[in-house]
């Protein structure tokens, strides 16, 4: 089983190298990329099954070097869940991108550079999830940063270059905070191996722990797009091609959330973070959804809802209980899947409607009824309508909060309920204007509410294609079907999330997996 762990990173890196060499053979590039992610998905599924059934994490000491001198790769239930869900989403979006490339001739996503960069992004994601030391996690973050900048600027348009510049500057600042925090932690403890840090940090004075924790949290909060460090996201993601936007929205912010969970539960469990995190969660929920309500562009609207729903995850982390962490893990899985599926659905809307602005869309229910159904299911799920996973995840978070009652918790529960209703309102407004409104009513339609909405700064009024390739529709259908599976199998998935939360909240198990004979 342990032999599968390094393959999660090595295979995508090897695939990236091979696809780069085969830049003039697009068909081979596609075959290698798809095969690589299929193998990684299968390996992640096997690891999750074995880790969950045995209750023992898979640990690999790279090169045979014992920690703290060597690199540790660690797969427990939480890591395995994140890798498996990420691999499924990456595979689904890759199929969508292949369909788009076949239809458009790869004018927006040049296949020669897209596939190697996409696989490097995948390797960075997986490395961040299975890293057993802070510096290796930092390396995974930097792989993500380098690959995401290339993907964000594919096509070389002015809008994408501007968005990419903002993204790279913010990400570099975040990386500097992360690297500085690692340096401080190493200086204070003499190690960056998380299993050792779990014990050594506890020996530090509380004020030193707070400083180290704050330094790490700032870096992770930027990655996770937590208010007030989320200003960059709505202007960065919507300019990229549809497959890139879907991956960014679904996965990249969750790396930051994962890092917050891992470090909070393993390294800084004695640091009082409940009140600061709840305050941050409140403003992330409210400011994000209010921003969404003012948008006319569907991509920007979804980007703001992405920010707001990060608030639910921060709320779950702030609660601190095993139930709260379990509900947070379930909600992360839900949000990765639903947000990815919604963004690829918007990619279909853009093709058939020639725009992503609700002031220019109409009559799509008649033009593309199946796309209307796909978007409608995703919208209901994200809005938290029962019995979908969005509703179940929010109920789990609210129930966990109610077990630790306080005035601030009740304020967060109210803010969460309001955010859910406003999310549903914003998405149903999109569905009503884009699909239900007759196309004949679009021209000359006057509405004080719609006229007050903000268009994307780079909105040009439309795109030139309107076909719906079967491969793109099939990929979107598959992703929406996976979101429905979160509801159908909610019971077992909640139980798995709770078991993962128990492991995360028990540092002794993590330490024992890395140091069976006891930490040095």
Image: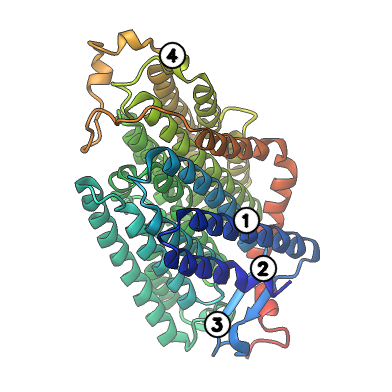
Q: Where's the C terminus, which quadrant?
A: bottom right
Residue drawn 50% across the image and 69% down it: 13
Circle nearer the viewer, 3 or 2: 3
Q: Position of residue 205 (x, y in %)?
A: 46, 80
Distance, label 3 to label 1, CA atoms, is: 26 Å
Q: Give the residue pinned by disc 4.
A: 436
Which numbered disc flags the more N-terminal residue, 3 or 2? Answer: 3
The image quarter containing residue 216 is bottom left
Q: Where is residue 391 in the image (x, y as percent from the top left)?
A: 59, 34
Query: Which residue appears farthest toward the right when viewing the image?
Result: 54
Measured along the vertical axis of the image, is residue 48 above or below residue 389? below
Residue drawn 44% across the image and 38% down it: 343
Label disc, if present, on residue 71 of the rendered structure: 3
Local secondary structure at mark 4: helix
Label disc, if present, on residue 38 of the rendered structure: 1
- For the residue carrying disc 3, how many other residues have a C-alpha within 10 Å: few (<14), some (14-19), or many (20+)? many
Which numbered disc flags the more N-terminal residue, 2 or 1? Answer: 1
Local secondary structure at mark 1: helix
Q: Give the residue pinned by disc 2.
A: 506
Q: Where is residue 460 in the image (x, y as percent from the top left)?
A: 22, 32
Q: Nearer the viewer, residue 321 or 330?
A: 330
Q: Position of residue 337 (x, y in %)?
A: 55, 43
Q: Where's the N terminus, which quadrant?
A: bottom right
Query: Which residue appears farthest toward the front when viewing the image?
Result: 25
Circle nearer the viewer, 2 or 1: 1
Residue drawn 28% across the image and 60% down it: 168
Measured along the vertical axis of the image, is residue 479 above or below residue 361? below
Which numbered disc flags the more N-terminal residue, 3 or 1? Answer: 1
């Amino acid at each position: 089983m342990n032999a599968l762990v390094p393959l999660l990173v090595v295979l995508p890196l090897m695939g990236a190298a091979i696809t780069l060499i085969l830049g003039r053979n697009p068909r081979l590039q596609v075959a290698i990329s798809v095969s690589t992610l299929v193998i990684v998905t299968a390996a992640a599924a096997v690891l999750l099954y074995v880790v969950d059934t045995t209750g023992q994490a898979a640990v690999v000491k790279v090169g045979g070097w014992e920690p703290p001198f060597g690199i540790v790769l660690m797969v427990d239930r939480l890591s395995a869940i994140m890798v498996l869900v990420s691999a499924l989403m990456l595979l689904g979006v890759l199929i969508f991108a292949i369909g788009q490339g076949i239809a458009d001739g790869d004018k927006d996503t040049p296949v020669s550079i897209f596939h190697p960069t996409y696989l490097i992004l995948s390797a960075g994601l997986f490395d961040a999830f299975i890293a057993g030391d802070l510096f290796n996690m930092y390396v995974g973050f930097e792989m993500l940063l380098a690959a995401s900048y290339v993907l964000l600027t594919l096509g070389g348009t002015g809008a994408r270059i501007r968005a990419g510049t903002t993204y790279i500057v913010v990400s570099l600042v975040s990386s500097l905070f992360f690297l500085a925090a690692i340096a401080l932690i190493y200086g204070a403890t003499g190690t960056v191996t998380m299993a050792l840090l779990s014990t050594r940090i506890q020996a530090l004075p509380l004020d030193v722990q707070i400083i180290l924790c704050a330094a790490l949290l700032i870096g992770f909060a930027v990655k996770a797009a937590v208010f007030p460090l989320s200003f960059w996201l709505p202007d960065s993601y919507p300019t990229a091609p549809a497959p890139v936007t879907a991956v960014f929205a679904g996965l990249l912010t969750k790396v930051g959330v994962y890092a917050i969970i891992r470090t909070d539960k393993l390294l800084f469990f004695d640091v009082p973070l409940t009140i600061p995190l709840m305050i941050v969660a409140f403003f992330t929920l409210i400011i994000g959804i209010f921003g969404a309500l003012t948008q006319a562009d569907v991509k920007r609207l979804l980007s703001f809802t992405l920010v707001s729903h990060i608030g639910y995850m921060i709320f779950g982390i702030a609660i601190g209980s095993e139930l709260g962490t379990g509900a947070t893990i379930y909600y992360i899985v839900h949000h990765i899947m639903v947000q990815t599926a919604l963004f690829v659905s918007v990619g279909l809307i853009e093709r058939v409607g020639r725009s992503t602005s609700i002031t220019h869309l109409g009559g799509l229910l008649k033009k593309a009824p199946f796309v209307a159904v796909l978007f409608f299911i995703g919208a209901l799920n994200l809005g938290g309508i029962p019995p979908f996973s969005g509703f179940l995840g929010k109920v789990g978070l609210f129930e966990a909060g109610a077990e630790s009652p306080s005035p601030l918790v009740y304020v967060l529960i109210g803010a969460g309920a309001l955010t859910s209703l406003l999310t549903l309102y914003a998405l149903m407004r999109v569905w009503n204007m884009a699909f239900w409104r007759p196309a004949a009513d679009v021209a000359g339609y006057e509405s004080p509410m719609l006229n007050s909405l903000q268009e994307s700064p780079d909105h040009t009024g439309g795109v030139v294609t309107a076909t719906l390739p079967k491969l793109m529709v099939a990929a979107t259908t598959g992703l929406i079907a996976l979101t429905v599976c979160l509801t159908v199998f909610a019971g077992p998935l909640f139980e798995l999330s709770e078991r993962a939360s128990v492991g995360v909240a028990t540092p002794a198990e993590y330490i024992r997996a890395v140091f069976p004979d006891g930490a040095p």
